[in-house]
Amino acid sequence: MASLSLARKKKNNVSRNAAVERKNLITVCRFSVKTLIDRSCFETIDDSAPEFLNFASILEQILSHRLKGQLTWFGYESPRSFWDYIRVACSKVSHSCICSIENMENVSSSRAKGRAWIRVALMEKRLSEYITAALRDYKTTRRFYDDGAIVLGEEANMLAGMLLGLNAIDFSFCLKGEGLDGSYPAVIDYTPYLKFTQSSDSISSDEEELRTLGSSGSESSTPENIGPPFTMDENSWYNKCKRVEQKYRLTLEQKGYLEELVRLREVQLSDSVTQNKLLLQRIKDTERSHKLEKEQLEYIIVELQDQLKSFHRLGHLSADASLSQISFDPGHSQDGNGKHEGSRLGGGKEETPSLLGLCGSLTSVASYKSLTSLKSSECLASPTTEMTSPGLTPS
């Protein structure tokens, strides 16, 4: 029982530490995005900016959180970089930079390619789009990450929303610098995000400060409380005003950040509406073209059927005409025994084979007329003309 309780307690501690780690990484990422936005108001962000280097390290840690290793043939698990996951999960993104980064000559290691992808995606203002497309492919994400990873939890949606604000920044990076060296791991500097507070005697909550300011203002409206209290509490008044001013600036920056997010969402919505209209118009055009093609095919089928019927009709008519012409030919009358009467001519001569072949191929009146012209041209005489022609005597 004691061993079971110890194992359960150890498991609870591990899950609690993992939850704290995920929460800390997401919180630090939010702070780094905010510092990048603040820094971009004064100068261009490049590889030398410490805010960007810290952000790139944080994002690399998030994408590498509980990433599975690659199993080898011998059953060992070799380490893997987050670029292997991004390369597969973002392969279907239209006009992506995956192929260009994969073919870079000066970048060889997988970690260096992942860092180059972060920089190119920031310059393209599409980092949030890539992350969103990768998280949508849940099957691939599940295959690359273990349980408890940030990309498999609820924090993943927060990550995509935070990265959307970086589209308002113009980045300028060199893809041949030392920042792409994949030999050293990503190290996060937490010192810019640590909060140092004074003692509880000199600092109160924001509600108490506002209440004190309001009450002091109401008391100072009376003439008897203007002099000594104001001179005595001058330092405390100055500190309170400084804190309120700082709180106001933070609220103003958050307001600008949220306005930028709303503007980006409106642009995405308008683009989606435009694409939807184009797709609907394309569907209508396709249906119209399919309908026209169907009507044309039906018309062609009807024409072919009519031509087939007329062809059969002409075949029957030609067969009847050939039979009638053969029956009316005087040189081809048959007796009761099926032999031709004029098989032998007056001198014991037979008809030529060419004449018999031509007579057997007669199929129309036109061909019969051509036969008569052929007879006249070749000077082939019938038995009667042969008997009566001058210069010939019957044998």
Image (cartoon, helix red, strand yellow):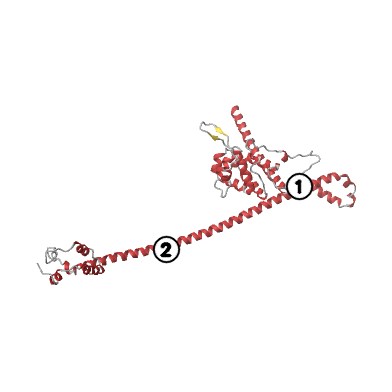
> Which quadrant is the N terminus positioned in?
top right
What percent of the width, then of the height, locates residue 200?
A: 79, 39
Give the amino acid type for the residue marked by disc 2 in the picture.
Gln
Residue at 90 percent of width and 48 percent of height = 227
For marks 1 and 2, give the CA distance. 73 Å
On screen, residue 378 versus residue 193, left or right, reads left
Q: Does residue 148 show up? A: no
Looking at marks 1 and 2 on the same chain, the residue that comes earlier in the sequence is marked by: 1
Reading the image, the residue beneath label 2 is 296
Front position in the image: 254 or 14? 254
Residue at 52 percent of width and 33 percent of height = 72
Q: Secondary structure at mark 2?
A: helix
What percent of the width, then of the height, locates residue 260?
A: 68, 52
Reading the image, the residue beneath label 1 is 247
Q: Is residue 178 above or below residue 385?
A: above
Residue at 69 percent of width and 50 percent of height = 257
Front: mark 1 or 2: 2
Front position in the image: 253 or 174? 174
Give the amino acid type for the residue marked by disc 1 in the picture.
Lys
